[in-house]
Image (spheres, rainbow, N blue to C red):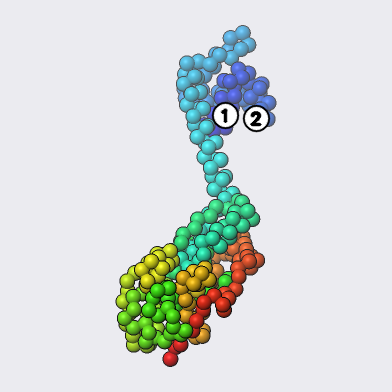
Amino acid sequence: MTIRHLKIFIEVADSGKMSIAASKFYISQPTVSQIIRELEEHYHTRLFERISQKLYITPNGQALLDNARRIVADFDALEKNMTKLNQKSLFRIGVSHVMDVGTFSEVMDSLHFRSPDSEFSVQFTGDAEIEERLLSFDLDAGIMAGPTKSNDLINIPLINDYLAIVCPAGHPLFEKESLVPEDLNGQHFARAASGDFSRQTLDALTHNSHIEYKCFWEASNMTFIKTAVLKHSCLALASVRAFSKEAAHDLVHIYMSIDSGWNMPINLVYPKKKAISEPLKLLQYIFMYLQIPEISGTDNIRTFILP
C-alpha cells in the first residue's frame, strides 16, 4: 500500500467513478479497479458497494477515507517543505562588531535582491568567535577586522580601516596635538573582549611600552565601547571608521600611528576547504561596488607616536 494507492482511492470516493480517477491519474480504468482491490485485500474489508452501476462507500471505506485524507495532506506538506529547503539554502554570516551596521544593512539588502532563493543568517560578534566558528563550519563567511590567525582561512580585503587611540572631548588629553605611550599610563580604557584584533594590539602596545592602564569597560559590542568613550570619558583603541562621525563633530580626537601594525582592513573570510557558493561571490561583488568613503585626514585625526 502506497501514497499513490490512497490518492487514487480518495479520487474514486470523491467522484464516485473509477473512470474519472483513471483520467486524472493517466491510467486505465482496470488499473484503478486493481488498486481498489489491492487496498481491500490489504485491509481485509470492502471499501465500496456497487448498486445500479454506481459506487457507494462502505462505513469501513469512510473510515479509511478520513485517515487517507489526513495522511495524504501530511505527505504533500512534507514534500512542499522539503522542496523549499532544497530551493533556499541557508548562508550564515558572522560580522565583526566594528562593522558599521548601516553599511552592512545595505549589503544585506543587495544580497536579498540578488539571491532571492537563499536564506541568510547574520550574527554580530567578536572576531575570535567568528574565526572559531568558520573553522568548525558553523559559519559560511565572516566579515572580520584584521587578519585571521589560521592558515586554513582565506582573507579578502574589503574596506580600509585603522586602529587609533580615541579620546573624548573634555578628557585631559583631548587638547594634545600628539600622544606617546606614556600618556596612556594609568588612564581609564574601554577595551574589546579577549581575542579581538584591537584588544591584541592594545595588549601588545602596553606590554612593549611597559605601561599600565585601568580597564573601566570591556565589551564585544562597539556600541557599548562608544558609550564608555562618549559618556564615561574613557579612552579606547578602536576603529577609526567607528568614530568618524564623532570626530567630524569634534566629539572625539583620533590619534593614529603611522605604524603599519595598526592597519586594520575589514576582510571577507571563509574556509579554504569550503566550496565557493554564489552568496559568497555576491558578498565580494557587493563590497567591491559599495560606495564607502575613504578616511579623511581632516577628520580631527592627530598623531600617536610609537617609540
Percent across and percent down for residue 83 are 57, 45
Amino acid under disc 2 = Phe
- Could you tell me which residue is drawn at 57 percent across and 50 percent down? 88
Q: Is residue 232 positioned above or below 211 on the image?
A: above
Which numbered disc flags the more N-terminal residue, 2 or 1? 1
Percent across and percent down for residue 287 are 61, 66
Q: Which residue position is annotated with label 1? A: 7
Give the CA separation, mark 2 to mark 1.
9 Å
Number of residues whose C-alpha sits closer than 10 Å to that of mark 1, classed few (under 14), some (14–19) or many (20 or more): some
All told, the count of numbered labels is 2
* One can see residue 173 in this view: yes
The image quadrant that residue 286 belongs to is bottom right
- Could you tell me which residue is drawn at 56 percent across and 77 percent down? 298
Q: Which residue position is annotated with label 2? A: 25
Q: Are marks 2 and 1 in contact (CB under 8 Å)?
A: yes
Q: Nearer the viewer, residue 38 or 7?
A: 7
Mark 2: which secondary structure? loop
Q: Is residue 134 positioned above or below 20 on the image?
A: below
Q: Is residue 139 left or right of residue 23?
A: left
Residue farthest toward the bottom in the current orientation of the protein: 307
Percent across and percent down for residue 253 are 47, 76
Residue farthest toward the top in the current orientation of the protein: 52
Mark 1: which secondary structure? helix
Q: Nearer the viewer, residue 213 or 282?
A: 213
The image quadrant that residue 282 belongs to is bottom right
Amino acid under disc 1 = Lys
- Could you tell me which residue is drawn at 49 percent across and 64 percent down? 95
